[in-house]
Image: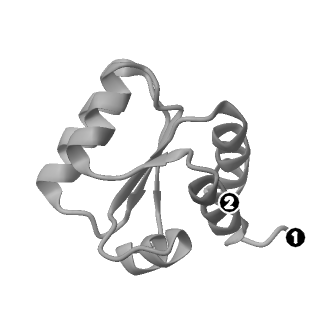
Amino acid sequence: MADPKAYLNILGIANRAGKCTFGEELIVKEIQSKKSKIVLLANDIGDQTKKKLTDKCQYYQIPYFFIDDRETLSHAVGKTGRVAVSIHEQGFAKKLKTLLDNNNRG
């Protein structure tokens, strides 16, 4: 069976490659300009931020996933207090989507 946390390694690599964007406003801009390929949200994200980002993703048809808590997400990218990340490179986005699709099936 695949490691359910394998996506965290991909996320770390994507971040080191400079393919990640953080910060609510910057992520919204990426979604609107269709630069964002996938958005990952911490499952303990605040309600207002969650609604704003998920609404934008749905409207612009950008896939998004709820993942671990903000602590795990922040640790994966070597930063603190991160609740959302946008990946703007197709290869990383595709790999993350595959891993997360598999994990989120019962």
Task: From the image, state whether disc 1 or disc 2 is nearer to you.
Answer: 2
- Give above or below for 28 relative to 46: above
Residue designated by label 1? 1
Counting from the top left corner in percent of width and height, residue 73 is at 46, 70
Left-right relation of 16 to 58 = right
Residue designated by label 2? 13
Can the viewer see residue 25?
A: yes
Q: Quadrant of the N terminus?
A: bottom right
Counting from the top left corner in percent of width and height, residue 32 is at 31, 22
Question: Of residues 89 and 44, which is closer to you in this image?
Answer: 89
Q: Which residue type does callout 2 highlight?
A: Ile
Q: CA–CA distance between discs 1 and 2?
A: 22 Å
Badge 2 element:
helix
Question: Of residues 97 and 10, which is closer to you in this image?
Answer: 10
Q: Residues within 10 Å of mark 1 (few under 14, many from 20)?
A: few
Badge 1 element:
loop
Q: Which residue type does callout 1 highlight?
A: Met
The answer to which of marks 1 and 2 sits earlier in the sequence is 1
Q: Residues within 10 Å of mark 2 (few under 14, many from 20)?
A: some
- Give above or below for 16 relative to 32: below
Counting from the top left corner in percent of width and height, residue 55 is at 25, 33
Identify which residue is drawn at 73% across, 67% down: 6
Counting from the top left corner in percent of width and height, residue 90 is at 66, 31
